[in-house]
């Protein structure tokens, strides 16, 4: 009898845990795919439209934030597609913003507008007022098109009744180079991709920018080897850089790589970087992608790994197909690191995963002052 016939997929998982713990996460991914389906190991795209369709004027839509994820642009795009671009009112909560938020909600309920209150966790003292506002809401007196959008980090101050009555959404940053590239190009429209006056340069540098974005995010999993400080870059950094790339290529006679490199590495992304060695590193990483060779050469390779290059793709679908064909687990060489750097990162990921699995198991002993189930889930998020 062959090996596959002697052991089950769970047995193989136990063997990997015992002999090669650093490979436990990829092994668990295979286990889930075999038993539940491939769709459970691939991060799905955020379908905000379906969440909106499930809501009504009395049901708030709540984004539970995680580092590196910013839903603001998705809400703006949804509002534009539904004709609410001028009727979406956003307010970042903080000290003294409570009365402004209440006034926005009152006007929006009458006019049928949308209100997005950002960073609710920073307005803990006003959360009781938000709870009262939602508790006293009478759907029969409110415009049916009114919507309340809320964003918050996990916080004990967030009112439980509002949380229970709302639609909860969490959209964590993707893990892996391929997943990051996929997410970046999901936000690129056909109009933007094909609308630049220098199509070849724009398409090549846009892919280079997305690749740079993915690389600096994924280097964080290597700890101090990747970055001295784990910075929280966000999708908005990529979006702003994309807009600048499009604008400068349209307005400048040539390809201003020096200007674009400064804006991306020193301002947009570098504005979050505080360590001087990390500043040098992020500039050097971008310099390896923003090059004349990227634009001029065919399939210019970004690393010693042959599968990573700026594709000579004519359409947006071709780029997405190329990304979909990339390996799910990348070699550290693409990040400029030695292959051994991955071992420590994989072991840490495996231990964190096992701790999470054990922490959510039912506890047989009586309560002894440990964390409540809600606190465990909050810490995991």
Image: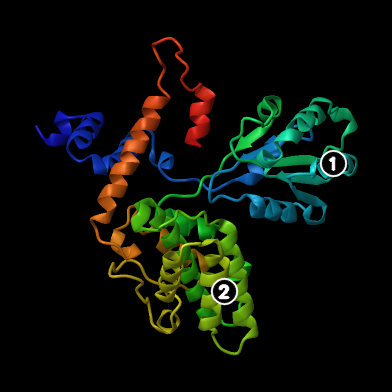
Q: Nearer the viewer, residue 149 or 372?
A: 372
Image coords of residue 76 (percent x, y): 70, 54
The N terminus: image quadrant: top left
Q: Nearer the viewer, residue 233 or 225?
A: 225
Q: Nearer the viewer, residue 134 or 98?
A: 98
Residue 188 in sight in this render: no
Q: Is residue 67 left or right of residue 337?
A: right
Q: Is residue 304 above or below residue 56?
A: below
For image coordinates 36% across by 59% down, the residue present is 326
Q: Is residue 304 left or right of residue 318?
A: left
In the image, farthest residue toward the left: 1
**The disc label shown at residue 263, or none:** 2
Image coords of residue 352 (percent x, y): 36, 37
For image coordinates 79% across by 35% down, the residue present is 57
Q: Is residue 215 left or right of residue 337?
A: right
For image coordinates 50% across by 45% down, the residue present is 44
The residue under label 1 is 99
Q: Earlier in the sequence, mark 2 or mark 1?
A: 1
Residue 245 in sight in this render: yes
SS at circle 2: helix
Q: Residues within 10 Å of mark 1 (few under 14, many from 20)?
A: few
Q: Nearer the viewer, residue 272 or 149?
A: 272
In the image, farthest residue toward the top: 366
Image coords of residue 258 (percent x, y): 51, 82
In the image, farthest residue toward the bottom: 253
Q: Is residue 302 above or below residue 347?
A: below
For image coordinates 23% across by 55% down, the residue present is 340
Q: Is residue 265 above or below residue 256?
A: above
SS at circle 1: helix
Image coords of residue 291 (percent x, y): 43, 80
């Amino acid at each position: 009898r062959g090996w596959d016939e002697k052991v089950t997929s769970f047995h193989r998982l136990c063997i990997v845990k015992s002999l090669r713990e650093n490979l436990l996460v990829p092994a668990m991914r295979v286990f889930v795919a075999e038993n539940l389906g491939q769709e459970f190991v691939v991060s799905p795209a955020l379908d905000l439209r379906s969440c909106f369709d499930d809501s009504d004027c009395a049901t708030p839509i709540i984004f539970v934030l995680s580092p590196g994820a910013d839903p603001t642009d998705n809400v703006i795009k949804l509002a534009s597609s539904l004709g609410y671009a001028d009727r979406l009112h956003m307010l970042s909560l903080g000290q003294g913003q409570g009365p402004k938020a209440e006034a926005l909600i009152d006007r929006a309920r009458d006019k049928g507008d949308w209100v997005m209150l950002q960073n609710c966790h920073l307005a803990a003292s006003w959360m009781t007022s938000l709870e009262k506002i939602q508790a006293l809401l009478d759907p029969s007196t409110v415009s049916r098109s009114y919507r309340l959008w809320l964003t918050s980090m996990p916080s004990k101050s967030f009112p439980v009744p509002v949380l229970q009555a709302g639609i909860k959404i969490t959209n964590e940053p993707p893990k892996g180079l391929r997943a990051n590239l996929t997410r970046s190009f999901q936000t690129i429209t056909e109009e933007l991709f094909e609308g630049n006056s220098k199509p070849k340069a724009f398409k090549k540098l846009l892919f280079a920018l997305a690749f740079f974005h993915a690389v600096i995010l994924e280097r964080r999993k290597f700890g101090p080897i990747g970055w001295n400080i784990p910075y929280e870059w966000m999708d908005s950094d990529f979006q702003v850089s994309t807009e600048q790339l499009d604008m400068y290529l349209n307005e400048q006679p040539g390809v201003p790589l020096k200007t674009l490199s400064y804006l991306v590495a020193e301002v947009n992304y570098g504005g979050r970087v505080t360590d001087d060695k990390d500043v040098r590193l992020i500039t050097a990483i971008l310099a390896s992608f923003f090059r004349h060779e990227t634009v001029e050469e065919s399939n210019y390779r970004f690393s010693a790994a042959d599968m990573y290059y700026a594709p000579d793709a004519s359409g947006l679908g071709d780029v997405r197909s190329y990304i979909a064909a990339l390996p799910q687990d990348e070699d550290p060489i693409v990040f400029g690191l030695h292959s051994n750097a991955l071992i420590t990162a994989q072991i840490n990921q495996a231990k964190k995963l096992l701790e999470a699995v054990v922490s959510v198991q039912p506890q047989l002993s009586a309560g002894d002052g440990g964390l409540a189930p809600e606190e465990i889930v909050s810490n995991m998020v």
